[in-house]
Image: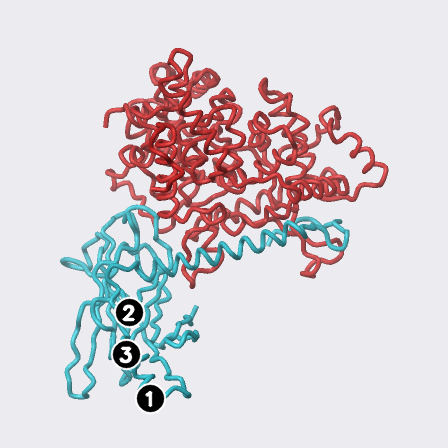
Chain colours: A red, B cyan
Amino acid sequence: MPSRYPRSSAHDHRYHELHNQAEEELARTLMYSELHALPPSHPAAPPEHLKEPLAYMRKAQAGWEKRVLKSLNSMSTELGVPLARMRPAVEQKELMNKWNEMGTDEPDLSRFRPVYAPKDFLEVLISLRNPNHDSSEDVSARSHWGLIQVPLNVRDIPQLRRAYSELNLATGQLGIDDHAHVPPDLFENDYVQIGKKVVLDQDSAAAQQYSRQGCPTGLRADLWALILNSTNQPPDVMHYEQLKAGVIQHDLLVDNLIYKDVKLTASNDDYYFVFEDFLYQVLLCFSRDTAVLEHFKYNSATPPKSYIQGKVGDEECAVVYPPNGVIPFHGFSMYVAPLCFLYNEPSKLYSVFREMYTRFFFRLHSISSCPSGIVSLCLQFERLLQTHLPQLFYHLRQIGAQPLRIAFKWMVRAFSGYLSTDQLLLLWDRILGYDSLEVVAVLAAAVFAFRAENLMEVTSLASAEAVLADLSTLKVMPLIQISLFASAI
Amino acid sequence: MSTIRVRKMSGSTEEVQAVSCSIKPPVYLQIGDTRTDAAHSGICVVDVSLPFGKPVSIEEISFKNYYTASVSVRLLRRGPGQEAPAKWCTALRDLSLMNNPHTEGGSQDFYSIHRTQMMEEPDHVVSVRLILRQPSSAWLTFSLEDIKIFPHTEPDPEKEVSDWLSDLTLGDQHPDLEGLPDPQTVSSSIQQMWALTEVMQTNQTTACIGRFDVDGCYDINLLSLT
């Protein structure tokens, strides 16, 4: 037993326990920050197999990307706006002066439309088919009432209980046991002390394990940065400044999409409108960051390619567009908005967002068979609902209100903009703690379970949407806990 | 990939070519009248014949899966004497390729079976029989693709080392792997570690370079659709 964990104090014992659990987990799964994203690969497997092992999913992703690129090309041609343009010196100077208040600008964005919205993407997922899958009607034992028709392996409740054991009824949780009516010395005080120690020791693995029970508000920023290995050292700040220079120098068509998205979503949100300027500062820089291209090794998506004018076909003049290879869609800015509550320094905020995106968020808008990918999350949501609330599912199906059509928009954004921020951050604590987006699917099913009585009364998709329109009063941890540990199996 | 890299006793590595073999068309087994029975078969036999008159000692069998849930490997071995009759033995029984036969996990993955995973020594092998099983009715068909057999190479004695020393190094060809991790897991972990160092190295350089333009120019054509 290492001597720096004396047995005398209960805090230290619990901390030591936490640390050991974390180390075991680490040893078991070889979980380093970059490593966790790379699945075990066979030497004969080509790079595309690492991105996505299933051929039909690769094909579907390629087809979807082609549609998006065509759409972007059309926009550029029809509006007469080039994909990229070097800003004249005057404009560069102007932008530099206005950098901290880009939100005050009121550019004419009426001509720009988002390249796609989540519901367009949902249609693609619904049409996914495995050509080797026997979907003849005879096989009734496997009948699936939902929209997703690909046979991915998703975990059921007994498996989820084992995987998410720290969320059980007997374990203290932030989001439940820190409630105003619960005396803080029962759980909260001790838990916060342990958290402080984790931060002091800069222990990344322990921080991840700790986050499973939630992060105290005062420690969350540091804990998340630890888990994500996000630093704000001079090289990081310099990198951010370099990106900012890239924004000043070139104007990109996708910038208008970002402006439009921020104006349409975050600026209209009561919680996030104050952060409008931050969102531009992060997202515009994000588009210029070629370091993001690394994540395409394990992302089923491929960055769009183009050539310098007049040099089509010359590989020396081939470039990626936008520089980070990510085309923003309607709602993209909501991935950044909640982080503004935690970090107020742009380069730090940027660093954390970039890590969150290249670890988690990219999986929400690309077609892959990964357990954290949006396809698996959709299937898991539908399976959980069909297994545990069959009457509700059947009823909703009958009235033309397929549950996924309502839940999809929540899951694509990992609930950002739908929950109140303190609840959203408690949810994202668990995403980081378990290094998986699975809780998002579990929560989506839990929300339907919570409002089941009302939903059984409705008779149309529109009324079902209305019942589920406002999630701002929901408390996520009780819902998840009941769903996983208190439902009858 | 039609070569594998094999580490020899001396520490150097060598690229080993796959043996050219003839893979017979897969035979799907049915119960009852094969013409009228509409049910999909759940078991398939693939025979791989090695070149006639040249029995092979197998280092590794590699393949790409296509919805096969598990595979068994049987070997037809002919003893060293020409008169000795060839005998079948089971080298591997029911290696799981898909952890759930009804779902996608592992369905299109690449696999290797190393000689150390086999229950019998895969030496003097004349023919390999792969028995594929897919108990789930979820799939229309199942098979293995790109089946390759790599021969075991005897390590060369170093020319400058005297005979008695080379006898020592050639000694234990088949280390007892009981209690040690499965070579496949170890080699995947090593692959992962390698990949990690690659990623970390590239990360360092792109952070410094990171230019997205070509000599200051980023006036680009419309996006390529190919």
Q: Which amino acid does label 2 sit on?
A: Arg
Q: Mark 1 belongs to which subunit?
A: B
Name the element at disc 2: helix
Marks 1, 2: nearer the viewer: 1
Residue A429 is marked as none
Mark 3 lies on residue: B171
Residue lying at 75% horizontally and 53% vertically, measured from the top left: A309
Q: Mark 3 belongs to which subunit?
A: B
Are there few (<14), some (14-19), or many (20+) residues within 10 Å of tag 2? many
Residue B163 is marked as 1
Q: Is residue A156 left or right of residue A112?
A: left
Looking at the picture, tell me which residue is in the foreground, B34 or B140.
B140
Q: In which quarter of the image is residue B123?
A: bottom left
Mark 2 lies on residue: B115
Q: In which quarter of the image is residue B9?
A: bottom left
**Mark sitting earlier along the chain (3/2):** 2
The location of residue A272, given as percent across then percent down, is: 60, 22
Q: Which amino acid does label 3 sit on?
A: Gly
The Cα–Cα distance between marks 3 and 2, rounded to whole angstroms, is 17 Å
The Cα–Cα distance between marks 1 and 2, rounded to whole angstroms, is 27 Å
Q: Do the residues labelled 1 and 2 touch (CB within 8 Å)?
A: no
Looking at the picture, tell me which residue is in the foreground, B142 or A155.
A155
The C terminus of chain B sits in image quarter: bottom right
The Cα–Cα distance between marks 3 and 1, rounded to whole angstroms, is 12 Å
Marks 3, 2: nearer the viewer: 3
**Mark sitting earlier along the chain (3/1):** 1
